[in-house]
Amino acid sequence: MDKKSGPPLPPYFNLDPKAAAAKLSDPVDTARFAKAAAFAGRGRADLAKRGYAPDGQKKLRKFSTWEICRYLIPVAPAHLRRVLNKHPELPQGEGSGSAKRFSLEEILLLRNHFAEEGVSTKEYRPYRPKGLPAKVVAVANFKGGVGKTSTAAHLAMSAALDGYKVLVVDLDSQGSMTSIMGGQVQDEWQTIFPLLARDYAMRVEAENRVRAAAAEPEIPMDETLTEALTISLKDVVQKTHWPNIDLVGAQLNLYWAEFQIPVWRMALRHWALWDALSSALDTGEALNEYDIILLDTPPALGYLTINALAAADIILVPLGASFLEFDSTGRFFDMLYSTFASIEEGENAARRREGLPEMKFEWDVVRAIITRFDASQQTDLANVIQAYFGDMTNTYRQEFTAMVGQAGESVNGIYEADYRDFNRETYTRGRETFDRTYAEFKEILLGAWWRDDQERKEAENGETQTA
């Protein structure tokens, strides 16, 4: 009688070393990396073009009357049609009747018309107090794969559809945000790098004037620093296929900044390296020209991320509802504390010696956002994360849907996807994922602006009473 065969052995038993060796290629040398990179470059271009127009440039799709009235401008479709008939000078879109479609540029013009001529109680333009600067938002976490770039990109697109003017700064040398935004970056001179170099070069020039007066040796200025002095923010900002989103892109060479910044700091110890990005945005008039500046950071707490966090008014920290991501995010907050507390301590010691007021890092809001959420499996852990992080956690948990996955595969954001490619329920649910994230972000944004506006008015009233 035959013995009953047991369950099959796991696949890692009884492997033949000789057969395994036969499957191996020759040992890999450094040249093989170059070959792999070249193949990846060709493949990347091929895959990217699947989400691009035939001429290789990304173009933003047009929006239907249904989308405009449902998501963008609070008017009824019948009223929109009446307004268009009454005002032939307004953009009329393409197509006819309820099938008309409009570009975002045309929608922005329609939005302005309704803001000037429409019902005063409706929000045709988003809130921003006059005279106050843009809000700078850093999306950061040193855990990779938590949805930083996806969150930042969709917030930028949401805000643009809402009528805000947005600048996106890609600080990650992987350049994923740059790809989503259709940016073209040839080298590090088209990234934020020359602006960081410019800030250092300006400080060196000031220091050298002091040293020259004291007959002391000057700090040398190399060709990179000399050239950086000629670069401004406008030189590195590029337009995107979104009419109200501009981009400072990134590419691999941007990573060199992580090595160069500490070298500069060693040569000029009192250079405030964490302030270089803030200075670039300020002197480049970005805080006046844009409403929102979104900083997409690399998955590391390096010098680029420190610059982003120091420049930010609002910090958003995406994480998944898993133990490892919760643990990593807790360590990220710990590193934020030790890094910025150390900067404060060092700077304030010097300021006290010189009789200057002390500095203090402060942010309007810091919020953790739970991303890629699956309510059927992660609710308990998400509740624990929310309990421990408390009011530093967004209320809404960003769900992962099929539409989210498909948008990522085609190098597009959800707002760039045409709803006609999905059934209405799938589109509505997928869009709601980011609409609700944006709604909570917008509430933070408006609250921070309103608070700033009240403080400004109180200060002005105090000055008036004093006078």
Image (tube, rainbow, N blue to C red):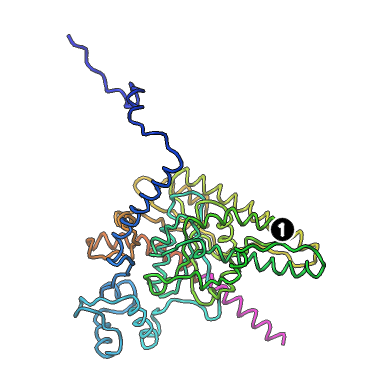
Q: Is residue 378 left or right of residue 269?
A: left
> Could you say which is closer to the camera, residue 290 or residue 431?
290
- The secondary structure that dominates the magenta segment is helix
> Could you say which is closer to the camera, residue 252 or residue 129?
252
Queried whether the magenta region covers residue 4, the answer comes back as no
Q: Amino acid at mark 1?
A: Arg
Expressed as whole percent of the image width and height from the top left, the position of residue 382 reads 44, 49
Indicate whether 302 appears above or below 450.
above
Look at the image and tell me in which quarter the N terminus lies: top left
**How many neighbours does mark 1 have within 10 angstroms: few (below 14), some (14-19), or many (20 or more)?**
few
> Could you say which is closer to the camera, residue 401 or residue 165?
165
Q: Tell me which residue sits at (42%, 57%) in the image.
A: 176
Expressed as whole percent of the image width and height from the top left, the position of residue 126 reads 43, 76
Q: Residue furthest right?
A: 214
Q: Which residue is mark 1?
A: 269
Expressed as whole percent of the image width and height from the top left, the position of residue 437 reads 41, 62
Indicate whether 454 appears above or below 324.
below
Q: Which residues are magenta?
A: 447-467
* Number of marks in picture: 1
Q: Tell me which residue sits at (33%, 78%) in the image.
A: 107
Q: Tell me which residue sits at (56%, 71%) in the image.
A: 231
Look at the image and tell me in which quarter the C terminus lies: bottom right
Queried whether the magenta region covers residue 459, the answer comes back as yes
> Could you say which is closer to the camera, residue 386 or residue 138?
138
